[in-house]
Image (cartoon, rainbow, N blue to C red):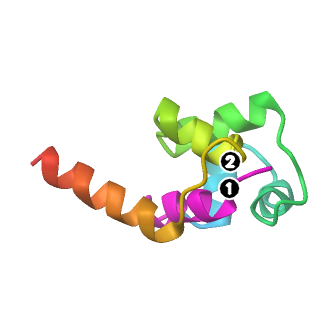
Amino acid sequence: MINQNFLKAKMLLANLTVADLAKKTNVAEYTLKRILANSYQPSTAIARKIAYALKLTDDEIITVFFSELKKMSFEEVLLKDQLKSRMTK
């Protein structure tokens, strides 16, 4: 099961639409939409492409693709990224 809220939040933070992500990953828009709707479990290769395109950390990869292990709300994602960007300034 995919944590689609986290994935959508990361796409929003990266300013990427589904079409943009499809181009960056060379994965069909239809497939990405199914992943975001949680009606398709991506292969390892597709998950890797998405993770690379969104520059996900190892922890974020677990959050997105193994959401049953670690759930995070949309708001928590935004807050975490805000805190991370403050720390790097």
The picture places residue 68, in percent across and down from the top left corner, at: 72, 46
- Rendered residue at 50%/30% (across/down): 58
Q: Identity of the amino acid at label 2?
A: Ser
Q: Are marks 2 and 1 in contact (CB under 8 Å)?
A: yes
- Rendered residue at 79%/60% (across/down): 29
The picture places residue 36, in percent across and down from the top left corner, at: 75, 62
> Which residue is most to the right?
39
| Number of marks present in the image shown | 2
> Which residue is disc 2 drawn over?
67
> Which residue is most to the front?
69
Disc 2 element: loop
Earlier sequence position, callout 2 versus callout 1: 1
| Magenta highlight range | 1-15
- Rendered residue at 66%/51% (across/down): 23
Q: Is residue 60 magenta?
A: no
Q: Identity of the amino acid at label 1?
A: Asn
Q: Is residue 8 magenta?
A: yes
> Which residue is disc 1 drawn over?
3
Q: CA distance from mark 2 to mark 1?
A: 5 Å
Disc 1 element: loop
The picture places residue 38, in percent across and down from the top left corner, at: 83, 60
> Which residue is most to the left?
89
